[in-house]
Image (cartoon, grey):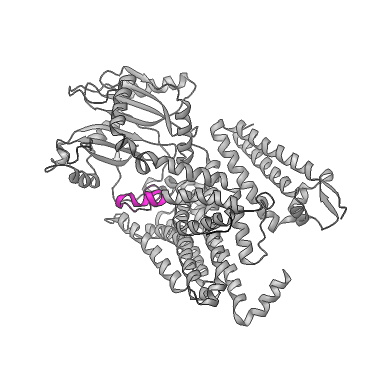
Amino acid sequence: MQNSFRQAMAWLHTWYGLVLGYVLIVAFFFGALSVFDREIDRWAIPDTRFEPQVMPSYDGMLKDVYERLKPHPDDWAFTEMRVVGPMPDPDTLTLTSLYAYTTHRDPLLQIGGEFAIPNRLKDSADDHAHVHGWTTIDPRSGEMLPDDQLKIGSEWFYPMHYGLHLGWNNLGYWLVGLSAFTMLIALVTGIVMHRKIFKEFFTFRPWKRTQRSTLDLHNLTGVVGTPFHLFFAFTGLIIFASFIYFPAGSSLLKPLHDQGEVLESAETGLPLEPAGVPAPMASVDVMVSEAKRMWAERDMAGEVGLLTINHRNDINGYVSVYRAGSDRVALVGEGIHFKASTGDLLREDPPRSVVDEINEFLTGLHLQHFEHWLLRWLYVFGGLIGCVCIATGFIFFVEKRKRKHAEKGSQGARIVDALAVATCTGMVIAAVGMLVVNRLLPAGMEGRGDWEAASFWGFWLLAFAHAVFRSAPVARNLLNPAWREQCYAIAALGVAAVVLNWLTTGDHLIKTIFLETYWPVAGVDLSLLATSALSLFAARKLAAREYAQQPSNVSFEAGDVAHV
Amino acid sequence: MSESLYLLAAFISAFTGMAWLALAMPVHWHQVHEQGKTRPATSAMRGTGSVMLILAGVFCLLADHASMAVLVWFMLLTLSAVLVAWLLARRPALFRLFCFGRFSVASDT
């Protein structure tokens, strides 16, 4: 039992923070990278290095592309498990609904849709007798991108941020959710246990001993970053609350949810179900033009962000056109709906209610599809100071205990330190190493994406093994050399990635900055070089500290401390 | 004024505001000045520093829609506070620029 409320909060902060901090720092780091996921995609897939495109013509291009769209093998396998009897030939299936989504940063267009299947569902509560298909196309030509080219930014780093690529029973979502909740606890308990929040608001004393200066940095990045940490942990939970953490609409409250859909359909005039009466499609391009004209009338001129067609080729079919939310926090909005068979206006979404506005703001601020480059970089900064806060928490934990543990012969500090190295520098090695492998693998290689994903885990596993193997000095109250060695590895990998990008694509920095300016690739290259420089600086500092800890240099260290 | 200039003004205001709020504390004042000769005019610096932070918010509002501006403002305050703390530790002499005339008084200690 703790002696006081403050001590109890300190216990909670320390142990919850330690256990879930390893997940949290991964969520923060890959969240920071995800701010520029589309740009990392451009770096990783050189064929897609061209300017962002607006939504292409449906009548002139997309219509034919959707005719070629097939069910995705992943969803095909998943659907086979949900239905009774064999599935029909995929080539005979009809696309019943579809979507196309783009943002101001996308040269490519993401499209997808649902194919109706005649099979009966095994679970009566399961009401989706569909199989899904999706792909990415070049909107200039309508050509589909090969499925085995991994978009490292949006398909690997981004899902790592919220799901850790642990798909089994949504385990990754739950772990990240739990760690986000822990972040909220850590912030509140941190505020309670911090005695001098305002007095030490700007305090950072790098000249003090490691334990003190680390705590300063932990407090600084925790307190100053509180609005960011609080909002991102909270909004991250909100985004997944309705369908992962509290899926009441598809479980306990499903009848109410279904009834709500019927009422909403009656109110909006947008049919919930197809009528079963075939009908041809009117021109979607005319509907899109009309939507743009209506937005312009409201002084909201902009491009289409999302285009959907429901109950395609049915008399109840309708087309929804949503404005891209580039100029504000919300993702998309101002939806305008047309009857698919005639092009008649069915509905113009009314201004959002206060509740909807708040919900859109909270999710939009986290998912950040807006066009604001300064804010994007500020988000990266926020994510990275979150990482610093968590990493310094680990280091403080070890520094506070390692002397005692060394005296008692305990391995506790050593284990925590090894895990900290494996997480902090290990995940950077995995991310940068993956980019190096991306540039080394042959362009047309089959299963290229799988090899890249395997290399990510391989690098991380190696970093973990190295951190554990080199951690023995911590048990003797010394610094783990793995910190320094992994910093050198990051520095080398970062430079290698930039050089390999130059050699394999011809896109060197002089070209991407000055000759044929292309900031997505230049930005990734510059960030890699900055990471390398910072890692090299850190490695040299760590080397100096290790040197000072050697027995033959203890007198120097003592003198140094006395000087301070 | 263009959006970029408003945002630059917002950052300068936020940084200046945070610098004055920090220098209003004797511990940081003495990181910049020789101990014992002067001390900060705490109220004046806190007041001016707070006004500068609000001014930063106004510049953000002039640059962007309110929903976006509030995010930029919070993040600029965070960035400025971290920068001030880091520069106070590493390059305290830079802050002499912010310690003119009426913000310092002769120390009575």
The furthest residue to the left = A85
In the rendered image, residue A153 lying in the magenta stretch gets the answer: yes
Query: Main SS type for the magenta part?
Result: helix
Front residue (pair A535, B77): B77
Between A355 and A492, the one lying in front of the other is A355
**Which residue is at the front of the view, A240 or A447?**
A240
At x 31% / y 59%, what residue is drawn?
Answer: A451
A552 up-or-down from A257: above or below: below
What are the residue bounds of the magenta stretch? A152-176
Left-right relation of A93 to A233: left
| Residue A260 seen | yes
Tell me the residue at 40%/22% (across/down): A349
In the rendered image, which quarter is residue A208 located in? Answer: bottom right
Left or right: residue A321 versus residue A31 is left
Quarter of the image with the N terminus of chain B in it:
top right
The residue most toward the bottom is A552
What is the x, y in percent for residue A460? 40, 63
Residue B82: x and y, percent?
63, 51
Indicate yes or no whether the magenta region holds residue A512. no
Percent position (x, y) of residue A503?
A: 42, 58
